[in-house]
Image (tube, coloured by chain):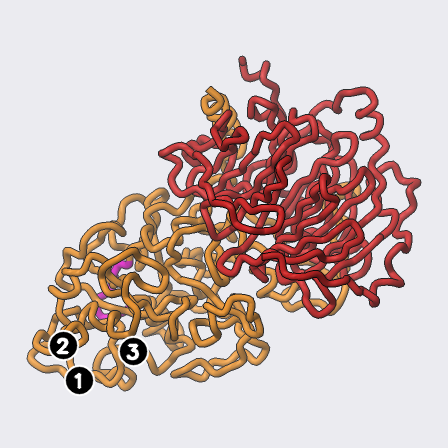
């Protein structure tokens, strides 16, 4: 009975506040957030924005922050994105329960959770040159090095997880055009079923606790079978780790219509099992109960089996974007057991390799 | 499990404590004096992202969920730390005690509520009885009333609210419906008034951040939109019932605590960003330990302050008259809904 009454109340609230219920995956873009939630014009606010000068005030002290932010950018982001039930929890363990697609960040000097060591993924505040590249943030790695806080900010292109946005060029334009590919995405509750048009697909972009950020709610498409938007994104910092097959970064020799003899593990342009023999094995991969995420040119739902023979690994197949409790944020997924952010029953690197490679499975 | 005690020596704040912060002449809420500032169990053992606090009136203790350090710190009425309860694999978030002295702990990393003895020994864990179709459910906050009833705020796929008897059996529930049908979206905090006639739920991403429910768990008042004017919030994080049925609601992003009457009318605020006495650095919660004693916990400030506060005069008048002000914002009554 109470549930029914509450349902009526809920419908009422939904009707009067519909606009704020449609997060549509871009919470930072549009009406959901207010500018003053994160910014202050003069680092001296003494009252609010109401007509009579009233309103809650948030006087500030100390040194002003770049971009007129109210606080250090990482601290500001973590205010909502660490330990909160209403937003994705990105630091250390997840209070929201689900298995995060990107895993967990750690932070320089934060020893409060030994499971998330600085070697286990991206480390907020770290001042180091990105492996394989030249990128370094001399003031420490920030959330905004990877994420555009305002979301869709270039040509209204909506990007997966608000990734990117630090450039000014539209897709495919500019000096690095070949790799300037936005990680476009579609959402089941906004654009409809997965049609393969976006590089990523979310089963449901709304809902509490941001569960659509979980591995069970995401599928990765392969819009262009010669590219990987994910790898192109990562390449912005980890420059030498990604590129086209037969290029200087990955190497690869065309033998019998397929590429082999890579100098770095390919992240695009190579289908699992394409070469056969002692290389990757599609049957081995599809035969597992649990799979690391790979790109599929055939649109699929997150829970669907990989039906295409043209699936391709990319960065997220082996690494959690944020990191996890394993070295390098690697996913030790043996293929059996409960799926976790670290993998499943797997315990070591060979479990990951054995997802596709028979030598590791022997 | 209780590990020793440590005397709080907060010498650097000694000169600041007891300094008057505001004049009591204002009719709105005000901080009259800062009585203490406590950065942790000891000067060398400080809090890390603390996110929950509870005042146990029966024992005169204050419990701080030192979330980032995976522990609960127990302080007596003189702010001496009486010990810490370790949760090595957990992130304690909320606490409550029952009339048998048992401590109930909400752990942000567990779907179960931990039950401990007064001495901190684990008795058992139990999962609140949510409906089978509620999906993933995660306790967010809990209150145990003087009646012995336990009120549990649940987040997760389908957030809701449970009222349980002493044996943990469901007496009432609300919510637990699909996202578009529920008044709850991402609730984080719950408070129940002393008479157990009003419940306040804080839900920072809902249309209104605060929902008041009656004893039948029917929503009766909504207020506190996400905005910029008085009575709005940027990020409501916690709620406490104060004297005169006032509601003291922590806003983390505005580093302040806004005060409302029991009908949702805005009465004023205290705080503001800073590191000094009476200023807050991302406050995560507040609780009254006496009618004029407010304890405020700061997540980024990593400390709690004990404040002597002036309660709005209007609240005292309402308490004397035994009624609340007309509702003001996003409000509807049961009769308007045809019930």
Q: What's the magenta region?
A: A220-228
State yes or no: discs 1 and 2 in contact (Cβ < 8 Å): no
Q: CA distance from mark 3 to mark 2?
A: 20 Å
Residue A222 at x, y = what percent?
24, 62
Crowd band around label 3 with a 10 angstrom C-alpha radius: few (<14), some (14–19), many (20+): many
Identify the residue at horizontal 69%, vertical 26% (top origin): B195
Mark 2 = which residue?
A: A279
What letter labels the chain drawn in orange?
Answer: A
Crowd band around label 2 with a 10 angstrom C-alpha radius: few (<14), some (14–19), many (20+): some
Q: Are marks 1 and 3 on the same chain?
A: yes
The chain holding disc 1 is: A
Identify the mark at residue B306; answer none if there is no mark: none
Give whichever of A183, B333 is nearer the camera: B333
Looking at the image, residue B316 lies above or below residue B228? above
Mark 1 = which residue?
A: A261
- Give yes or no for residue A225 being in the magenta stretch: yes
Q: Quadrant of the C terminus of chain A?
A: bottom left
Identify the mark at residue A243; answer none if there is no mark: 3
Residue B144 at x, y = what percent?
61, 35
Give whichever of A197, A84 is nearer the camera: A84
Q: Nearer the viewer, mark 1 or mark 3?
A: 1
Identify the residue at horizontal 63%, vertical 27% (top origin): B147
């Amino acid at each position: 009975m109470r549930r029914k009454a509450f349902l009526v109340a809920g419908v009422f609230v939904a009707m009067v506040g519909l606009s704020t219920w449609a997060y549509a995956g871009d919470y930072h873009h549009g009406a959901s957030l207010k500018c003053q939630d994160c910014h202050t014009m003069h680092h001296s606010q003494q009252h609010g924005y109401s007509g009579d000068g009233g309103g809650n005030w948030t006087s500030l002290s100390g040194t002003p922050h770049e971009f007129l932010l109210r606080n250090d950018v990482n601290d500001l982001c973590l205010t909502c994105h660490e330990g909160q039930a209403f937003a994705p929890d990105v630091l250390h363990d997840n209070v929201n329960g689900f298995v995060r697609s990107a895993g967990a960040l750690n932070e320089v000097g934060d020893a409060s959770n030994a499971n998330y060591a600085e070697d286990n993924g991206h480390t907020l505040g770290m001042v180091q040159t990105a492996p394989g590249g030249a990128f370094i943030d001399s003031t420490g790695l920030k959330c905004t090095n990877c994420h555009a806080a305002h979301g869709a900010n270039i040509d209204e292109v909506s990007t997966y997880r608000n990734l990117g946005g630090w450039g000014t060029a539209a897709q495919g334009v500019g000096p690095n055009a070949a790799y300037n590919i936005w990680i476009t995405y579609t959402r089941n509750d906004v654009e409809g079923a997965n049609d393969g048009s976006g590089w990523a697909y979310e089963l449901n972009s709304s809902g509490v606790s941001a569960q659509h950020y979980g591995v069970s709610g995401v599928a990765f498409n392969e819009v262009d079978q010669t590219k990987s938007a994910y790898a192109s994104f990562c390449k912005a910092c980890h420059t030498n780790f990604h590129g086209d097959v037969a290029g200087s970064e990955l190497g690869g020799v065309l033998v019998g219509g397929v590429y082999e003899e890579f100098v770095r593990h390919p992240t695009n342009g190579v289908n699992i099992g394409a070469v056969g023999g002692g290389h990757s094995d599609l049957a081995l991969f599809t035969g597992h109960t649990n799979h690391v995420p790979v790109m599929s040119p055939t649109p699929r739902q997150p829970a669907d089996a990989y039906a295409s023979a043209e699936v391709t690994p990319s960065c997220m197949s082996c690494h959690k974007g944020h990191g996890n409790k394993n070295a390098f944020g690697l996913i030790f997924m043996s293929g059996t057991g409960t799926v976790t952010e670290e993998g499943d029953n797997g315990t070591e690197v060979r479990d990951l390799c054995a997802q596709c490679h028979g030598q590791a499975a022997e | 499990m209780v590990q020793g005690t440590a005397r709080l020596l907060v010498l650097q704040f000694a000169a600041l404590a007891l300094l008057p912060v505001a004049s009591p002449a204002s009719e709105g809420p005000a901080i009259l004096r800062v009585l203490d500032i406590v950065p942790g169990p000891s000067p060398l053992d400080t809090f890390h992202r603390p996110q929950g606090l509870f005042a146990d009136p029966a024992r005169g203790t204050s419990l701080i969920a030192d979330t980032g350090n995976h522990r609960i710190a127990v302080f007596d009425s003189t702010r001496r730390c009486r010990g810490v309860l370790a949760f090595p694999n957990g992130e304690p978030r909320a606490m409550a005690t029952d009339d048998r002295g048992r401590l109930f702990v909400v752990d942000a990393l567990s779907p179960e509520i931990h039950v401990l003895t007064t001495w901190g020994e684990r008795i058992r864990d139990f999962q609140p009885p949510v409906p089978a179709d509620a999906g993933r459910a995660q306790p967010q906050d809990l209150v145990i009333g003087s009646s012995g009833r336990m009120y549990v705020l649940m987040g997760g796929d389908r957030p809701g609210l449970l009222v349980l008897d002493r044996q943990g059996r469901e007496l009432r529930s609300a919510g637990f419906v699909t996202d578009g049908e529920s008044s709850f979206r991402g609730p984080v905090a719950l408070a129940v008034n002393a008479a157990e006639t009003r419940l306040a739920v804080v839900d920072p991403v809902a249309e209104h951040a605060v929902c008041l429910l009656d004893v039948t768990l029917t929503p009766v008042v909504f207020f506190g939109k996400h905005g910029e004017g008085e009575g709005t919030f940027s990020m409501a994080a916690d709620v406490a019932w104060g004297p005169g049925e006032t509601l003291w609601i922590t806003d983390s992003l505005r580093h302040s605590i806004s005060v409302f009457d029991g009908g949702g009318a805005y009465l004023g605020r205290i705080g503001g960003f800073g590191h000094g006495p009476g200023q807050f650095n991302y406050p995560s919660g507040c609780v009254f330990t006496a009618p004029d004693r407010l304890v405020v916990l700061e997540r980024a400030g990593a400390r709690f302050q004990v404040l002597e506060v002036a309660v709005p005069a209007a609240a005292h008048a309402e308490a004397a008259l035994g009624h609340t002000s007309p509702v003001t914002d996003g409000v509807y009554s049961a009769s308007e809904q045809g019930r």
